[in-house]
Image: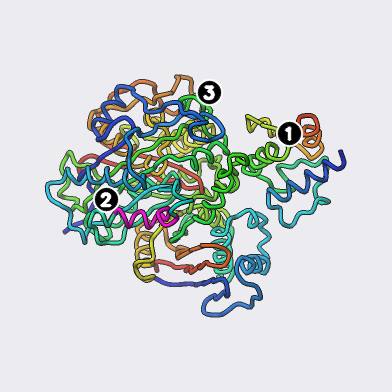
């Protein structure tokens, strides 16, 4: 067997908009948003806020059950069950079941949450939890790729999940990071982010490179880089994001990319930093976009959810509009962002993400084999 | 005013965990941010919380903090004029 | 893989490269004693939560003993850590700032530490490491060797990484913690 690559064999997204990847994509393409107004008193927090919250009731522990639902839906798409001893579960989350902190501390341990999910699925290998703040969903896919290419296992289930809670909302409010209005990524008058919840799953399989078919999605490259600058503020030079972009573009050309799915949280500093990083990496002419206007910032789920929607967009020859972008560019470098859907015939994209702790991560996804 | 200035210094040292700093080390007119105490953006946010908790002053916009936290003197002046507790 | 240095810190003792370092305190006070003894002159130490203090002191003592130039920006060294309890102690502390409706003052300085990877960022900032930083969480159901081996494989799959600070960092409270870090190279 030649070089093994990480091929996508199934995916599923559970969001406030829909239960299923393609239904989510269809609604996003129509411009639908999950983000709604929520009342401070009802949530017992300082101020009203905007968020994309899943209305369907899920039993406690909620994050565990959101994840289980999404993973099971992804597994159902496979023609046969995965070999339980050769499959690793990789969970991406920032706060897991944090709402139980005063009641069931053991359920709050992220490793315990992952073990419970693995147990319910009958998986026997110890699960891995990637907890690199908001970059976790991209990092988890990088971990999957490494496990598969290194031969540690043959299959990797990556699930990104985030349930919103008073804990998270109050914390972001203390950072004055939440916008009281729908977020406006890359716009001049952007004032902050909206939070969101989702569970999103991608199952990867180690596949010989020569067996990749034209319609297969492959994670070609991944990188995780630190800014070494500040634990909460992004680097003013886009250091880590630039380095992550540069690393995943090794051996690839900018004109092969349909788009770069940026983090685009709509906080003043994040979007500005990303524009710098994209320019420094020589990618300023590549279309970019943010999906935060559709779902809000789904934190641990964001990297996985946004990868799924980006794959669906490329399959549909589309560069998705950045919902909330008001056509007045508010970043210093001229990134190619748009408020309407555009068409593309390219077959690859980058997903970039950044977060607290100075963490940045990028992956390059490509459809089909390398000629 | 002298008393308020001393109190503010002690509170700043406590909430920002400035372990090796004494009230005498903080000059009334010196900039709080930038050089000197080595405070950063998280410290500024924490001072906003302190203003509300200790003095009932609610700053909606972190940008306001920039002006108010210029120096101990400016801060004391502002607290004196706007405090509700 | 080549191990260039090791450090183990428990609430009772600090052992570096097999040698017990002279200390007099225990628990949280031991960490601060180590910080003082290191002459790091890094006041941010006092703003950190327990997990970060543990990681900071462990990495500082480990790296101090290395014959290498420090504080020069570099992207070939990764910081890859794993934990069981992560930042649970800080989660609990943040929760107390919002628990009481009559005393609801969510603290940004505490909230920022409610992410387990902040410690990897603190170490990267201190040492100007621009390479990979990652935090993984595991229950202690597999052996330490198995977990360490997995970290190693994950770390050196990135061709940029030639050395790494890797290991286990667990902080339950000021009386219960464990740091076991290794400086490894892929030579």
* In the foreground, C170 or C21: C170
Q: Quadrant of the N terminus of chain A?
A: bottom left
In the picture, the disc for residue A207 is none
Label 2, on which residue? A157
**How many residues crowd mark 2 within 10 Å: few (<14), some (14–19), many (20+)?**
many
Same chain for the residues under marks 1 and 3 in the image: no
Extent of the magenta region: A105-117
Q: Position of residue C25 (x, y in %)?
A: 65, 73
> Is residue C179 depicted above or below A237 in this figure?
below
Q: Mark 1 falls on what kind of element? A: helix
Q: Residue at x 24, y 45 (%)?
A: A218
Q: Are marks 1 and 3 in contact (CB under 8 Å)?
A: no
Q: Position of residue A314 (x, y in %)?
A: 26, 32
Q: Position of residue A354 (x, y in %)?
A: 45, 42
Report the chain holding disc 2.
A
Q: Position of residue C71 (x, y in %)?
A: 59, 58
Q: Earlier in the sequence, mark 3 or mark 2?
A: 2
Asked which quadrant contains residue C161, the reply is bottom left
Q: Quadrant of the C terminus of chain A?
A: top left
Label 1, on which residue? B68
Q: Residue at x 79, y 40 (%)?
A: B72
In the picture, the disc for residue A189 is 3
Q: Is residue A370 visible?
A: no
Report the chain holding disc 3.
A
Marks 1/2: CA distance? Answer: 51 Å
Same chain for the residues under marks 1 and 2 in the image: no
Query: What sort of colour scheme is used for the picture?
Result: rainbow
Our reading of the magenta stretch's main secondary structure is helix
């Amino acid at each position: 067997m030649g070089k093994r690559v990480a091929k996508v064999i199934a995916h599923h997204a559970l969001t406030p908009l829909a239960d299923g990847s393609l239904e989510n994509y269809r609604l996003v393409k129509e411009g639908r948003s999950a983000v709604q107004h929520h009342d401070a008193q009802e949530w017992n927090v300082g101020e009203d806020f905007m968020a994309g919250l899943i209305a369907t009731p899920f039993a406690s522990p909620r994050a565990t059950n959101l994840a289980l639902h999404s993973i099971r839906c992804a597994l159902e798409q496979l023609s046969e069950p995965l070999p339980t001893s050769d499959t690793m579960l990789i969970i991406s989350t920032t706060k897991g079941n944090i709402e139980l902190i005063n009641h069931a501390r053991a359920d709050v341990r992220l490793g315990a949450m992952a073990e419970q999910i693995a147990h319910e699925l009958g998986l026997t290998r110890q699960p891995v939890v990637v907890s690199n703040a908001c970059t976790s969903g991209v990092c988890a896919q990088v971990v999957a790729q490494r496990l598969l290419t290194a031969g540690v296992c043959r299959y990797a289930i990556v699930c990104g999940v985030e349930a919103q809670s008073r804990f998270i909302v109050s914390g972001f409010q203390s950072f004055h990071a939440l916008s009281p209005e729908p977020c406006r990524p890359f716009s001049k008058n952007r004032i902050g982010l909206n939070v969101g919840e989702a569970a999103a799953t991608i199952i990867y399989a180690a596949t010989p490179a020569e067996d990749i078919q034209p319609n297969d999605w492959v994670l070609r490259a991944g990188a995780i880089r630190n800014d070494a600058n500040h634990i909460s503020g992004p680097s003013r030079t886009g250091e880590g994001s630039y380095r992550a972009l540069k690393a995943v573009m090794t051996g690839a050309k900018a004109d092969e990319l349909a788009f770069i799915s940026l983090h685009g949280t709509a906080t003043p500093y994040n979007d500005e930093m990303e524009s710098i990083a994209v320019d420094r990496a020589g990618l300023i002419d590549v279309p970019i976009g943010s999906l935060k206007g559709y779902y809000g910032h789904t934190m641990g789920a964001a990297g996985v959810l946004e990868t799924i929607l980006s794959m669906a967009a490329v399959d549909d020859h589309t560069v998705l509009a950045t919902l909330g972008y008001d056509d007045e560019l508010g970043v210093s470098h001229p990134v190619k962002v748009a408020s309407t859907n555009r068409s593309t015939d390219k077959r690859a994209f980058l997903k970039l993400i950044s977060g607290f702790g100075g963490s940045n991560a990028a992956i390059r996804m490509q459809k089909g084999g390398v000629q | 005013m002298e008393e308020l200035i001393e109190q503010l210094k002690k509170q700043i040292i406590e909430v920002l965990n400035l372990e090796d700093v004494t009230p005498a080390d903080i000059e009334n007119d010196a900039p709080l941010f930038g050089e000197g105490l080595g405070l950063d953006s998280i410290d500024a946010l924490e001072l906003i919380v302190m203003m509300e908790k200790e003095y009932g002053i609610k700053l909606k916009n972190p940008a306001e903090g920039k002006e108010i936290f210029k120096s101990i003197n400016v801060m004391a002046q502002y607290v004196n004029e706007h405090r509700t507790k | 893989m080549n191990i260039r240095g090791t450090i183990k810190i428990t609430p009772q003792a600090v052992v570096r490269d097999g040698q017990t370092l002279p200390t007099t305190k225990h628990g949280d006070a031991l960490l601060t004693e180590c910080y003082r003894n290191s002459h790091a002159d890094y006041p941010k130490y006092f703003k950190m939560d327990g997990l970060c203090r543990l990681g900071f002191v462990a990495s500082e003592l480990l790296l101090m003993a290395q014959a290498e130039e420090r504080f020069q920006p570099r992207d070939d060294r990764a910081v890859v850590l794993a934990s069981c309890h992560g930042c649970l102690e800080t989660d609990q502390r943040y929760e107390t700032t919002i628990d009481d409706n009559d005393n609801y003052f969510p603290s940004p300085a505490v909230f920022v530490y409610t992410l387990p990877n902040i410690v990897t960022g603190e170490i990267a900032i201190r040492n100007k490491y621009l390479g990979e930083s990652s935090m993984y969480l595991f229950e202690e159901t597999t052996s330490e060797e198995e977990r360490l081996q997995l970290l190693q494989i994950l770390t050196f799959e990135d061709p940029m990484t030639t050395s790494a600070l890797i290991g286990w960092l667990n902080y339950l409270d000021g009386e219960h913690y464990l740091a076991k870090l290794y400086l490894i190279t892929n030579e």
